[in-house]
Image (spheres, rainbow, N blue to C red):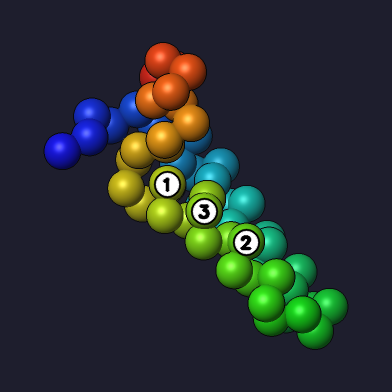
């Protein structure tokens, strides 16, 4: 469907960012903040970033 445009290093960074957001949300007591982690998590696991596609970037 979509061509993969996120490299392995970029995926690892996005997964780490998602994990940090989730941990931060649990520490601060705002579990709704964990919803923000969905974006980097989904893009890391799928390997496709819609913003990169629009900008023509490949990492």
* Nearest the eye: 4 or 10: 4
What x and y, as percent, mark residue 26? 73, 80
19 to 12, vertically: above or below: below
> Which residue is tagged 3?
39
In this rendering, would 7 be left or right of 12?
left
SS state under label 1: helix
Q: Is residue 8 in view from this perspective?
A: no
At horizontal 63% and vertical 71% (from top left) the residue drawn is 34
SS state under label 3: helix
* Nearest the eye: 8 or 59: 59
Q: Residue 36 carries which label?
A: 2
Query: Label 3: few (<14), some or many (≥20) within 10 Å?
Result: few
* Nearest the eye: 12 or 28: 28
At horizontal 51% and vertical 61% (from top left) the residue drawn is 38
* Nearest the eye: 44 or 8: 44
Q: Residue 43 carries which label?
A: 1
Disc nearer the start of the sequence (1/2): 2
What x and y, as percent, mark residue 59? 43, 22
What x and y, as percent, mark residue 32? 67, 77
**Residue lying furthest bottom in this view?**
29
Q: Mark 1 touching mark 3, by CB under 8 A?
A: yes
What x and y, as percent, mark residue 39? 52, 53
Q: Mark 2 touching mark 3, by CB under 8 A?
A: yes
């Amino acid at each position: 469907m979509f061509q993969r445009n996120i490299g392995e290093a970029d995926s690892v960074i996005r997964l780490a960012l998602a994990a940090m957001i989730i941990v931060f949300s649990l520490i601060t007591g705002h579990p709704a903040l964990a919803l923000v982690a969905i974006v980097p998590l989904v893009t890391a696991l799928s390997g496709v970033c819609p913003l990169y596609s629009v900008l023509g970037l490949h990492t």
